[in-house]
Image (cartoon, rainbow, N blue to C red):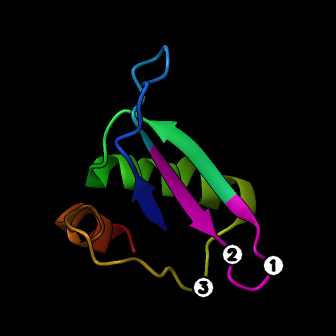
Amino acid sequence: MDFHGPITPTTKNGNKYIISLTDVLSKFIITKAVRDCTATTAARFLIDEVILKYGTPKCILTDNGTHFTAKMMTELL
């Protein structure tokens, strides 16, 4: 799971980052345009776009950016 950006131009909704999660085995990618790259945004993406649609991943690999190591994310995982 990783954030990409900021990208320009921003979307009409003010989104300037892309968050993505790639299934290593199948190479299936889930992406979403988001406004910021915070732990709250990462957690919301993980819940709404991944867990509720596809189930809970067995393992999540990140680059240990602050948005992935924040207290909220560690409590969620």
Q: Which residue range is magenta in the image? A: 18-29
- Residue 58 drawn at (x, y percent): 60, 85
| Residue for badge 1 | 26
Residue type, numbered disc 3: Lys
Asked whether the residues under the numbered discs 1 and 3 touch, taking CB atoms below 8 Å apart as contact, a structural biologist would say no
**In this view, 44 is above or below 36:** below
Q: How many other residues sit within 10 Å of disc 1, few (<14), some (14-19) or many (≥20)?
A: few
Please tell me whether mark 2 sits on a helix, a strand or a loop. loop
| Residue for badge 3 | 58
Left/right of residue 74 with respect to residue 44 in the rendered view = left
Eye-nearest disc, 3 or 2: 2
What is the spatial separation of the Cα atoms under label 1 and label 3, in whole angstroms?
Answer: 14 Å
Residue in the picture at 40% in, 77% down:
62
Residue type, numbered disc 1: Ser
Please tell me whether mark 1 sits on a helix, a strand or a loop. loop
Left/right of residue 7 with respect to residue 55 in the rendered view = left
| Residue for badge 2 | 23
Q: Nearer the viewer, residue 16 or 59?
A: 16
- Residue 23 drawn at (x, y percent): 69, 75
Residue type, numbered disc 2: Asp
**In this view, 48 is above or below 55:** above
